Amino acid sequence: MRTVYLNGDYLPETEAKVSIFDRGFLMADGVYEVTSVLDGKLIDFAGHAARLERSLSELEMRSPISMDDLLEVHRELVRVNEIDEGMIYLQITRGAPGDRDFAYPPEDTEPTIVLFTQNKPGLANSPAAQKGMKVISIADERWGRRDIKTVQLLYPSMGKMMAKAAGCDDAWMVEDGAVTEGTSNNAYIVKGNTIITRQLSNDILHGITRAAVLRFAKEAQMKVEERPFTIAEAQEADEAFITSASTFVMPVVEIDGKALGDGTPGSVAARLREIYLDESRKAAV
Ligand code: PMP
């Protein structure tokens, strides 16, 4: 049985209980992060901690823990649960004021903090990276502050189900004619030596993996264009891929039924995946 972390305590997963009045449960009033673990170490913890602080501050929510202590909690969970490859899920909510009200609860309401591990042996060696993913396009019907990593994930869940129903792996969301991002990842296309991905704004989550991958791409002399692109442009691209903390760099081989190139994963995505995994392992803490 997993050991999880709840409000300062390490507990067996079946003993960790949260109030029915918790704002996360009643209002999706909470933020989260997912940090991956390779070789028993945390990938880009500093990036995830910085984004967490920003999400909290945008929602005027206070953190119940310092980022230094948070690192120790992550490490302790990796240790006690013997995680070699996998993920750590972290969620902080505005707490449980003891009743339901739209107004934020009093300042002294203790936030709720939960962390748990997900053991995924073989995460870095995923067969999906060899095969590539098929995506469909769907309308982006999420709220306007996608830069804040909230637990309000119903539309992304619906998007995944629409993809599954179409025999595909994921959905790319489209707004005003351009791709915003995948349901749980950032989206990219490749033309020649140029990587194209939407620029940062409130329209997308500022992926921690995105920042690292774009940095590595530039270091490897690839060209990066941060701008919107359409599904039609993506279907004519040489390659496409996604990035996220749990999938790293994952090739996309089909968009709305149209195969990209010869329908197999492209060399740019493969190279970026390799560089990302190598460099991230070296910098893991
Ligand atoms: N966009 C969305 C909507 C996401 O949910 C995620 C992953 N949580 C990402 C992008 C990728 O972000 P990261 O690289 O930090 O995991």
Image: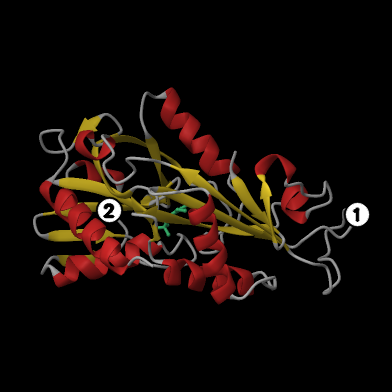
Q: Report which quarter residue 143 is drawn in.
A: bottom right
Give the structural element (helix, strand or loop) at label 1.
Answer: loop
Residue lying at the far right of the rendered structure: 99
Amino acid type of the residue that numbered disc 2 sits on in the rendered structure: Tyr
Residue beneath the point at 15% across and 33% down:
263
Residue identifier under label 2: 188
Residue 59 position in % (x across, y down): 66, 69
Give percent across and percent down for residue 272: 19, 56
Using residue 218 as the reference point, say whether residue 12 is left or right of it: right
Residue nearer the viewer, 264 or 80: 80
Asked whether residue 237 is in view, the answer is no
Report the front residue among 54 and 183: 54
Secondary structure category for the residue under label 2: strand
Location of the N terminus (image quadrant): top right
Spatial separation of the CA atoms under disc 1 and disc 2: 44 Å
In the shown orientation, is residue 164 left or right of residue 17? Answer: left
Is 28 on the left or on the right of 170, as rendered?
Answer: right
